[in-house]
Structures are given as C-alpha cells and as structure tokens.
Image: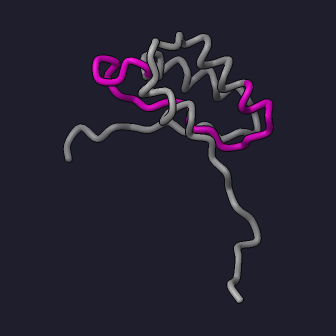
Amino acid sequence: MKSYPQRIVIEEQGLRDGLQSETPFLPTDKKLELIRAVADAGLKRIQVTAFVHPKLVPQMMGSRFLSTSSAKNTGKSFAKHLIAVTG
C-alpha cells in the first residue's frame, strides 16, 4: 500500500497564473479585493503576482503595490514571482 504524506499544502495560483491571460484588464484595486477574498476563504498560501513588464503581460501592472498591500494580512504567505533577466 502507498504511503501518503501526513499533510499537504494547497497554494492558490489563480491570481497570478490565471489572470495573466484574461482580458479586459482587471484594475489593481479589484485584484486586491480578490486577494483578500481568497485569504478570507482560508487559503494560507497565495501567489498574488509576478514581476514582469506590463507591456509583456498587462495584467501584472500594479505588482509592486499588490505585493506590499497583500502582506498586511497576517498569518498568510503571499508569493510573488520574479522573471529571470537572462536565461
């Protein structure tokens, strides 16, 4: 019989990965509302954004604001992705 881990970690990635291909543009204040709603729903690890130039991925506009504003929720882990400048 297989041995399963004693616990698992669920990390929400929709705010980063899911929004980047969405149109129309979602304003930063609406993204912050989504982050708070996901956090209030009980998720402890949330990927909130990626640091990529808005010309490449317009939905990532406001990344700096989101990364500092979302950190105000205590007891949660808010991840941000950095894009490598060189391969």
Q: Magenta stretch: residue 50 in it?
A: yes
Q: Who's the residue at 75% across and 33% down the image?
A: 74
Horizontal side of 51 relative to 45 (left or right) equals: left
Horizontal side of 14 relative to 42 (left or right) equals: left
Q: Quadrant of residue 23?
A: top left
Q: Position of residue 35 (x, y in %)?
A: 66, 26
Q: Is residue 15 above or below residue 43?
A: above
| Total numbered badges shown on the rendered structure | 0
Question: In the rendered structure, which segment of residues is drawn in magenta?
Answer: 37-59
Furthest residue in direction left, as rendered = 86
What is the image's colouring? one colour
Q: Who's the residue at 66% across and 22% down the image?
A: 34
Q: Nearer the viewer, residue 79 or 7?
A: 7
Q: Quadrant of residue 8?
A: bottom right
Quadrant (top left, top right, bottom left, bottom right) of the N terminus: bottom right
Q: Is residue 80 above or below residue 28?
A: below
Q: Nearer the viewer, residue 86 or 42?
A: 42
Q: Is residue 47 above or below residue 72?
A: below
Furthest residue in direction bottom, as rendered = 1
Q: Who's the residue at 59% across and 19% down the image?
A: 31
Q: Magenta stretch: residue 24 in it?
A: no
Q: Position of residue 43 (x, y in %)?
A: 73, 41
Horizontal side of 17 relative to 36 (left or right) equals: left
Q: Position of residue 54 (x, y in %)?
A: 34, 18
Q: Who's the residue at 24% across and 37% down the image?
A: 85
Q: Position of residue 9 (x, y in %)?
A: 68, 56
Furthest residue in direction front, as rendered = 23
